[in-house]
Image: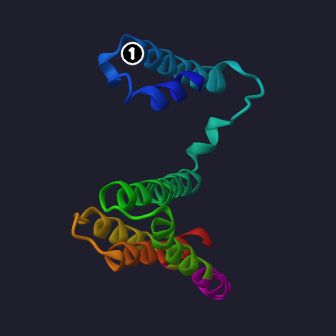
Amino acid sequence: MGALQIVVDKGQREDWFHSDFILVLSAVAALALLLFVIVELFVAEHPVVDLRAFKNLSFSTGNVVMFVAFFNLLGSIVLLPLYAQLLLGYTATLAGLVLSPGGVATLIVMPIVGKFIGRHNPKYPLFLGIAVCALSTWTMSNFSLAADFNALAWPRIYLGIGMGLLFIP
């Protein structure tokens, strides 16, 4: 994990795979991951991480959905303020204000979804949440240097609504 962290952290500064340092650490990380999987599946009598749980389709699907959702959420939380500050000239406060409506939208939607899934199938808000998050991400992919505050804030609101629909189920 340490080798992978260094690759991700220093990769850009070292020109990624044009650097022998990054290549060696990438190979170490890949080999360590492979050995981890082999040991956990075939060698360890009591594995630290029971990878056999991924045979369960519901468990695997839930993990994939949550990975994509958090990748989307955390990616937008990191990249949107950088975009706003470095390319659009926003202050840190304005960049934070672009993000905040999304958090408020999540805060409003989560209790509503919680009450809904008590009486209905939780798959419906889950699928709707995935669709809304996809719409939000697609909208963010169309940003340009002419984007104003509203053009940045509304996709974050959509993402907040989608995350609220997604997290509870």
Q: Where is residue 140 in the image (x, y as percent from the top left)?
A: 31, 66
72, 51: nearer the viewer: 72
Residue depicted at 29% across the width and 17% down the height:
18
Residue depicted at 33% across the width and 72% down the height:
135
Residue 35: quadrant of the picture: top right
Q: Residue furthest right?
A: 46
66, 104: nearer the viewer: 104
**Start-end of magenta stretch:** 108-124
In the rendered image, the quadrant that contains the N terminus is top right
Q: Is residue 50 left or right of residue 59?
A: right
**Placement of 63 over or under 29, stated as above or below:** below
Residue that badge 1 annotates: 23
Label 1 neighbour load within 10 Å: few <14, some 14-19, many 20+ = some
Q: Position of residue 25 (x, y in %)?
A: 47, 16
**Placement of 95 over or under 154, stated as above or below:** above
123, 139: nearer the viewer: 139
Q: Where is residue 3 in the image (x, y as percent from the top left)?
A: 54, 21
Amino acid on which the number 1 mark rests in the picture = Leu
